[in-house]
């Protein structure tokens, strides 16, 4: 099994992701520079967080046109596993690999804090190792993290099981009171219809090391590795 981490100019969570996968999860990891088009026979592709191209235009709008994205789209269309975190999520939405869009937070400010998220189902490649009825504490760090989809898209997503995580309190109660950015339906993470492309705004790689006092993010990486095996 080999993970490919795509690095764009402005990526700043790439080495966090590499560290967690390589050192904590003990996986084979390669770095994929955005100007290259060789995916190096990876088993999975991860687009990390950051500020690709300085977040000019819209977050992810320029990175979506990087040379490597043509290969990423082809990889996903063939059923390959693709996962985007924060800016990576934004890029995947811009590329049309995930439904919806990420808009400015309702308070128009950058938000960096721990939040709680609740999996909608434990039957996906990102949630299969999460204990039942467990809310995860995962940090967010974004200014454009408000998920939006029109009414018809949202209905389709619900019917197809494409909503992965919702913002909640520490006990798993989903409420607008615990929605940090105004995301529609408290949505924190989604997937495509085929359930091989995934995106979430919270950063599981920032909650996977004992040194940080929180390892809730490891449940997500455990789920991914179990699925890919």
Image (cartoon, helix red, strand yellow):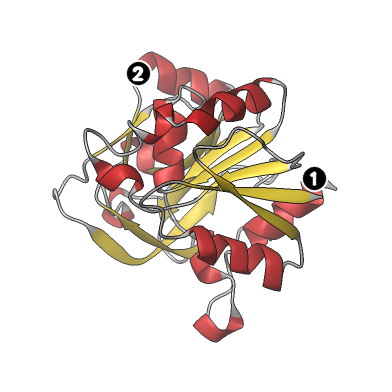
Badge 2 marks a residue whose secondary structure is helix
**Residue 151, numbered circle:** 2
Residue occupying the point 40% across, 14% down: 152
Q: Residues within 10 Å of mark 1 (few under 14, many from 20)?
A: few
Where does the image place residue 105, in percent across and percent down from the top left?
22, 46
Q: Is residue 56 left or right of residue 192?
A: left
Quadrant position of residue 208 = bottom right
Viewer-proximal residue, 65 or 106? Answer: 65
Residue occupying the point 53% across, 77% down: 214
Q: Residues within 10 Å of mark 2 (few under 14, many from 20)?
A: few
- Against 49, residue 41 (above or below) is above
Where does the image place residue 221, in percent across and percent down from the top left?
67, 58
Residue occupying the point 25% across, 60% down: 111
* Mark 1 or mark 2: whose residue is earlier in sequence: 2
Check the image and name the residue furthest to the right.
229
Viewer-proximal residue, 118 or 75? Answer: 75
Residue mark closest to the camera, 1 vs 2: 1
Number of residue marks: 2
Check the image and name the residue furthest to the front.
36
Where does the image place residue 190, in percent across and percent down from the top left?
51, 36
Where does the image place residue 189, in percent across and percent down from the top left?
48, 42
Viewer-proximal residue, 47 or 9? Answer: 9
Q: Is residue 161 visible?
A: no
Check the image and name the residue furthest to the left.
108
Badge 1 marks a residue whose secondary structure is helix
Residue occupying the point 39% across, 38% down: 90
- Against 161, residue 24 (above or below) is below
Q: Is residue 160 left or right of residue 222?
A: left
Q: Is residue 26 left or right of residue 70?
A: right
**Residue 228, numbered circle:** 1
């Amino acid at each position: 099994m080999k993970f490919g981490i795509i690095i764009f100019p402005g990526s700043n969570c790439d080495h966090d992701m590499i560290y967690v996968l390589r050192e904590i999860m003990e996986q084979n990891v390669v770095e994929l520079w955005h100007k290259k088009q060789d995916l190096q026979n990876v088993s999975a592709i991860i687009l990390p967080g950051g500020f690709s191209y300085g977040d000019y235009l819209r977050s992810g709008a320029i990175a979506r046109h990087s040379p490597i994205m043509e290969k990423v789209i082809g990889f996903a269309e063939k059923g390959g596993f693709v996962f985007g975190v924060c800016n990576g999520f934004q890029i995947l939405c811009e590329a049309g690999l995930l439904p919806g869009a990420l808009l400015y937070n309702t308070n128009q400010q950058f938000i960096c804090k721990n939040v709680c998220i609740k999996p909608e189902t434990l039957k996906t490649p990102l949630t299969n190792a999460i204990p039942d009825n467990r809310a995860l504490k995962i940090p967010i760090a974004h200014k454009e993290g408000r998920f939006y989809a029109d009414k018809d898209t949202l209905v389709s997503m619900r019917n197809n099981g494409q909503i992965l995580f919702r913002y909640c309190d520490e006990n798993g109660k989903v409420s607008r009171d615990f929605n940090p950015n105004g995301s529609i339906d408290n949505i924190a993470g989604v997937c495509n219809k085929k359930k091989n492309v995934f995106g979430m705004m919270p950063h599981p790689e920032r909650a996977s090391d004992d040194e940080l006092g929180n390892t809730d993010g490891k449940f997500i990486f455990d789920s991914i590795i179990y699925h890919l095996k």
